[in-house]
Image: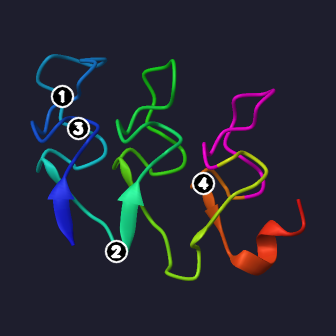
Amino acid sequence: MEIMCQFCLGKGKDPFELLSSEATCQVCSGTGVVQVKEPYRKCVFCGSTGVYPNSRLTCTVCGGKGWVTVPEVFTECCSHCNGTGTEFESKMPCSCCKGIGFVKLSDNNTS
């Protein structure tokens, strides 16, 4: 599925202009769109912005796309992070769900 790049908001330019105001977006390579496999959901770790929280880096969970592929078997909210995708103490991606906020029903019982 082709969707708008959340890191550059479809503009194809580096939103932070780190190298120059003409630099292309490192996520979509300047096209303004990215490919995501279905079924997909908004990245809960970065809030679907594509930006790693409190930084100017691409989100490590979604790769800057703003969306993550969540297999249909991953329908149970992660009990470790309560679906936030974030480790409470470290603010890093949740070690149980890898930052997506969902786990397989059988995996949720181990945390």
Q: Nearer the viewer, mark 2 or mark 4?
A: 4
Q: Earlier in the sequence, mark 2 or mark 3?
A: 3
Label 1 sits on what residue type?
Ala
Residue shown at 66% from the left, 39% from the top:
86
Q: CA distance from mark 2 to mark 3?
A: 20 Å
Q: Are marks 3 and 4 in contact (CB under 8 Å)?
A: no
| Magenta span dominant secondary structure | loop
Q: Earlier in the sequence, mark 2 or mark 1?
A: 1
Q: Nearer the viewer, mark 1 or mark 4?
A: 4
Label 2 sits on what residue type?
Lys
Residue neighbourhood size for the residue with mark 1, other residues' Cα within 10 Å, grouped as few (<14), some (14–19), many (≥20): some
Q: Earlier in the sequence, mark 3 or mark 4?
A: 3
Residue 25 tag number:
3
Label 3 sits on what residue type?
Cys
Is residue 96 placed above or below 7 in the rendered structure?
A: below
Q: Are marks 2 and 4 in contact (CB under 8 Å)?
A: no
Residue shown at 69% from the left, 47% from the top:
82
In the rendered image, which quarter contains the N terminus? Answer: bottom left
Could you tell whether 87 is left or right of 59 in the image?
Answer: right
Residue 101 tag number:
4
Could you tell whether 82 is left or right of 68 in the image?
Answer: right
| Observer-nearest of 24 and 74 | 74
Q: Nearer the viewer, mark 1 or mark 3?
A: 3
Q: CA distance from mark 2 to mark 4?
A: 17 Å
Q: Nearer the viewer, mark 2 or mark 3?
A: 2
Q: How many labels sit on residues?
A: 4
Q: CA distance from mark 1 to mark 4?
A: 32 Å
